[in-house]
Amino acid sequence: MAALAALAGCNQTSRMHTGSIGPSPAASASATALRGEKPLSEMSAEELAGAVRAYGARYDGNPKDKDNGLAFASALQMTGRNDQSLAVMQQMAIAHPNDRDVLSAYGKALAAAGDLPKALETVRRAQTPDRPDWRLLSAEGAILDQLGQPQKARVLYEKALVIQPSEPSILSNLGMSYLLANDLPKAESYLSRAVAQPGADARVRQNLALVMGLQGRFDEAERTASAVLSPEEAKANVVYLRQMLSQKNTWSELAAEDRG
């Protein structure tokens, strides 16, 4: 997703987030439980930095603690420190080799670090056909999307929705799948459904704002992003998006480059 990452920028708090694979639900839940406050995806850059320091200190004291390890790796990913996040998850996988939450988060850390084939292998290894986990199905689909296999990815998303109907993270991944294929109306349809569901996080709304902006509806994109970002950050996103779309590469060229 090199082109998409370039389009969205690296700072999660000031650029629209386009990744199909976010922090694992287990990691997010662990992080929220440990802090007793808002999810990582809704934190400012300063708050995320504080979370990284707190989880890091706990990790140094007990590197085998599952909940803190997942939360630490997730926070590192949110701040762009993907290599360090992967190193933490490698230690978690050694300490908890058969734990599906750990293997799922490990697969996502591998994907975030760019090792998509190994990520796919890890997520598939965590899955059990007799008791399929919808989170793993959705994660596998997101990896396949990044490997340029959208049809296979969408089959997995649909299977995940059978198990967990109307789950916003699955709908969001479906929307991002169509965004990668440059089918913006269909991407918006799924992302709008995702945003309307209870439990939809800030990244889903930012993805919807991105799709609106890519269709030239900048005012609407800014209003949508303002629900989860400060007015200044939402405006900065739209200004950035306008600049990107006015440059030589069109969105279609960026998407084609990304698939290549």
Image (cartoon, grey):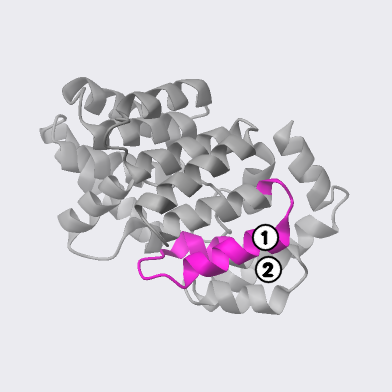
Q: Residue at x 53, y 76 (%)?
A: 226
Location of residue 25 in the rendering, given as x and y in whole percent from the top left corner: 31, 49
Tell which circle, 2 or 1, labels the residue nearer the N-terminal end.
Answer: 1
65 and 252: which one is in front?
Answer: 252
Q: Is residue 55 visible?
A: yes
State whether residue 12 appears in this view.
Answer: no
Look at mark 1 in the image and give the residue it sits on: 186
Magenta residues, as a range? 180-207
Between 55 and 164, the one nearer to me in the picture: 164
- CA gap between label 2 and label 1 equals 12 Å
Instruction: Residue under label 2, please give it.
Output: 212
Q: Horizontal placement of 211 versus 205: left or right?
A: right
For image coordinates 20% across by 30% down, the residue present is 99
Q: Residue 76's x, y, as percent?
A: 36, 42
Secondary structure beneath label 2 = helix
Give the residue type at disc 1.
Answer: Lys
